[in-house]
């Protein structure tokens, strides 16, 4: 009994250190597949334990190999095996889900913490009809879509501190009234996330092929990192949202591509060693691009392709091989103020709408050694 009590204390303390679950803290049920780690187990099988548990119970799952389960009542499932970053799928030390389908959360307030998923095609699924989920500190290895997102938004959902070592798509789906925080995701293709009234902060993405695609409404995308892949962040649509302090490291394609944005700010992001840095293909009213840094690109720095009514201010573009700051031929009514573009391979500043020395965009107090038409940027003052 003393060994079992110690195990329960360790599992619940580790989960508590990671944060507080929304599921009620009720009586603990112990599951062990072979009775080795937890001899005084209540059940040997996870689905059976879930079916028997009363709403609000905590189900502690000892090290072993387990089948898929659907959780259709508010329960807290806590696996053993230590922090997500150190798990390797060792069934003698970790609670490992080994079947093709993993765990589906299908009730308000379900918490899933501390499991390992080895080879599941769909390891973690959040039913869109419910909300208030907590998915924290899980490890996914070799999967299709590691976490299928969903939620009605009535209760706050938290997806935090999970590690995806290898998957086809990483994470996919929609979140409303949710936090997607501090996850580490490696995937073949870029994850795709739709956010409404949510935050996506502090995540580390490493796609091997395509960019991370995001649609955001009244949401915040802040402090994420993207390394590798053909493209960094592809913003399909953004309304009343903020993209700030994201770091897009070396890779192919465009660092931040904005297909359409309205009343959205892109601020203090850093893009390095991509083809193009930040490209606005459309949108405009109320959108700002401020205090970003684009360096060492193989193409252009910041590009307003077909943007209208965007304010571009206080950005820094250095050592880009193409044009540092470019307003394309379809860009109109944009205001470009106090930007610095230096060391560009073609031109530091250019406006393709220029006719007879006039442009359809307003350029004020921008710094650059070379520009077309002349005067939209001026050389830096010399000491």
Image: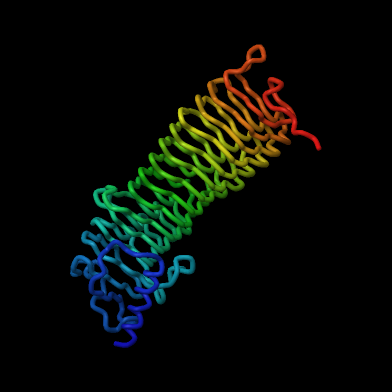
The quarter of the rendered structure image containing the C terminus is top right
* Residue at (58% x, 21% y) in the render: 361
Q: Position of residue 293 (x, y in %)?
A: 62, 41
* Residue 185 location (% of width, % of height): 47, 55
Q: Position of residue 228 (x, y in %)?
A: 57, 48
Q: Position of residue 357 (x, y in %)?
A: 67, 15
Q: Quadrant of residue 255?
A: top right
The correct choice, above or below, for 81 with respect to 332 in the image is below
Near-viewer residue (243 or 53):
243
Q: Residue at x 24, y 66 (%)?
A: 47
In this picture, residue 273 sits left or right of residue 164:
right
For residue 139, above or below residue 335: below
In the rendered view, would you say 184 is above or below 290? below
In the depicted view, which residue is nearer to us: 210 or 216? 216
Q: Residue furthest front?
A: 383
- Point 38% across, 56% down: residue: 159
Which quarter of the picture shows residue 35? bottom left
Where does the N terminus fall, quadrant-wise? bottom left
- The residue sitting at 50% across, 25% down in the picture is 309
13 sits to left or right of 320: left
């Amino acid at each position: 009994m003393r060994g079992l009590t110690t195990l329960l204390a360790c599992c619940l303390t580790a989960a508590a250190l990671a944060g507080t679950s929304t599921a009620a803290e009720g009586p603990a049920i112990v599951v062990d597949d072979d009775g080795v780690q937890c001899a005084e187990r209540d059940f040997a099988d996870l689905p059976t334990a879930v079916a028997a548990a009363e709403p609000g119970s905590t189900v502690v799952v000892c090290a072993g190999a387990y089948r898929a389960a659907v959780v259709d009542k508010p329960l807290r499932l806590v696996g053993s095996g230590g922090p997500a970053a150190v798990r390797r799928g060792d069934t003698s030390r970790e609670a490992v889900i080994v079947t093709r389908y993993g765990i589906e959360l299908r009730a308000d307030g379900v918490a899933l913490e501390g499991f390992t998923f080895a080879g599941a095609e769909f390891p973690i699924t959040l039913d869109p009809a419910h909300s208030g989920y907590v998915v924290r500190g899980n490890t996914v290895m070799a999967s299709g879509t590691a976490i299928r997102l969903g939620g009605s938004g009535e209760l706050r959902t938290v997806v935090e501190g999970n590690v995806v070592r290898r998957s086809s798509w990483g994470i996919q789906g929609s979140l409303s009234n949710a936090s997607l925080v501090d996850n580490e995701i490696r995937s073949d293709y870029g994850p795709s996330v739709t956010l409404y009234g949510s935050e996506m902060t502090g995540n580390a993405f490493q796609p091997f092929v395509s960019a991370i695609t995001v649609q955001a409404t009244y949401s915040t995308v802040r402090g994420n990192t993207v390394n590798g892949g053909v493209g960094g962040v592809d913003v399909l649509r953004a309304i009343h949202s903020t993209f700030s302090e994201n770091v897009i490291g070396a890779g192919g394609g465009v660092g931040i591509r904005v297909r359409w944005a309205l009343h959205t700010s892109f601020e203090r992001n850093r893009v390095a060693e991509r083809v193009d840095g930040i490209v606005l293909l459309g949108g405009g009213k109320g959108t700002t691009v401020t205090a970003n840094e684009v360096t060492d690109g193989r193409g252009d720095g910041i590009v307003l392709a077909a943007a209208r009514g965007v304010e571009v201010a206080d950005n820094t573009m250095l050592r880009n091989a193409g044009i540092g700051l470019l307003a394309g031929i379809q860009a109109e009514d944009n205001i470009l103020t106090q930007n610095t573009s230096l060391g560009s391979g073609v031109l530091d500043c250019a406006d393709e709408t220029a006719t007879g020395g006039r442009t359809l965009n307003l350029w004020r107090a921008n710094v650059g050694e070379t520009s077309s038409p002349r005067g939209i940027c001026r050389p830096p003052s010399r000491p």
